[in-house]
Amino acid sequence: MDKIKYWLLAGLLRWFARMSTPARLRTGRFVTWLSMKLAKRRQGIVRRNLELCFPDETAQTRERWLREHFRALSQSFVDRGVLWYGSAQAVRDMVHMTGYENVKQQFDAGKPVLLLVPHFIALDATGTRFVLAMSGDKSELATMYTPQRDPVVNDIMNQGRARFGKIHLVSRHDGVRELVRHLRNLMPIYYLPDMDFGAQGAAFVPFFGIPAATLLATARLGQRAAVIPAFGFWDPGTGRYHVQFHPPLADFPGQDTLEAATARLNRELETWIRRCPSQYYWVHRRFKTRPEGEPSLY
């Protein structure tokens, strides 16, 4: 049964990869319509997150962002066909990249690199384009990994993300020790800092003014590497993604405590989200873990 499921899903993504851009956009609009009909629980999570983080915006604005979010999220699913099964040139055509020189400067200087990649819609486009770009500088990277519940989805995702270069998957159960080992070997780390994995190894620091369980690992790793923010946005007009690698965060974590540095990261993330609020991954329950004694926000 899993084998049949694998070939059906892989076949669907390969079909998406062969589509023209206008056809993929039409397909994305259909998937959007379907998700708005079926994903009512996820819509509730998005609506609540937007309400918590943008209380001063009107309900009409937040509802528009919700619809735009599901449009971008649905399109990102369709476009994974190109990322995971399309040619290298097709990926380059779909994903425009700037700022790679900020990473290359660190490579050329023999310095370790921690790519800070928050959960934006363009997460997979950013990763695939980065692996393509660094093929002349590095052949491997490492990332922390949480297995998907569905083993078929897990296999397709891992194979798709590793098709242009070798990726070392580090289990979250191993903490940051394995990532530190890779940094010592000057292997770049692709790190996602902004999910709620519970209170262990985290601090409650403000995120849009609300205490949010945020991992301290980014600040710990930042003591050993240049921390380069990397994220992208999807353009609904052209169907292309625009991925940018920023200069390394200055003086991070510097003399700050791990908690203070982590609070700084959340403030930086807020700034990036405000550029395009609808394209952050609001489908996650970012405020799931609460300080002791506080009720659930969901």
Image: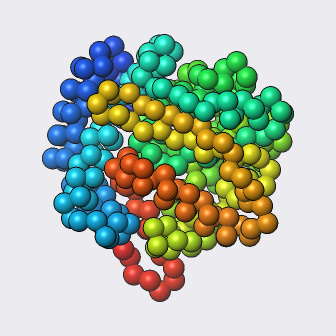
Q: Residue at x 23, y 48 (%)?
A: 67
Instruction: Identify the coloring.
Output: rainbow
Q: Residue at x 36, y 74 (%)?
A: 297
Count of marks, rendered view: 0
Position of residue 29 in the picture relative to residue 212 (left or right): left
Using the rendered view, name the quadrant where residue 105 is placed: top right
Q: Residue 244, how many percent across, how many down?
A: 54, 36
Establish if 64 lies above or below 87. Answer: below
Q: Nearer the viewer, residue 197 or 132?
A: 132
User: Residue at left 51%, top 79%?
Assistant: 291
Q: In the rendered image, which quarter is residue 274 located in?
A: bottom left
* Quadrant in which residue 230 is drawn: top right
**Residue in the foreground of this view, choosing between 202 and 49:** 49
Residue 79 falls left or right of residue 206 = left
Residue 63 in the image: state x and y as whole percent.
22, 57
Q: Front-most of 116 and 153? A: 116
Query: Do we see residue 179 in this rendering?
Result: yes
Q: Is residue 296 left or right of residue 26?
A: right
Quadrant where the C terminus lies?
A: bottom left
Quarter of the picture holding the N terminus:
top left
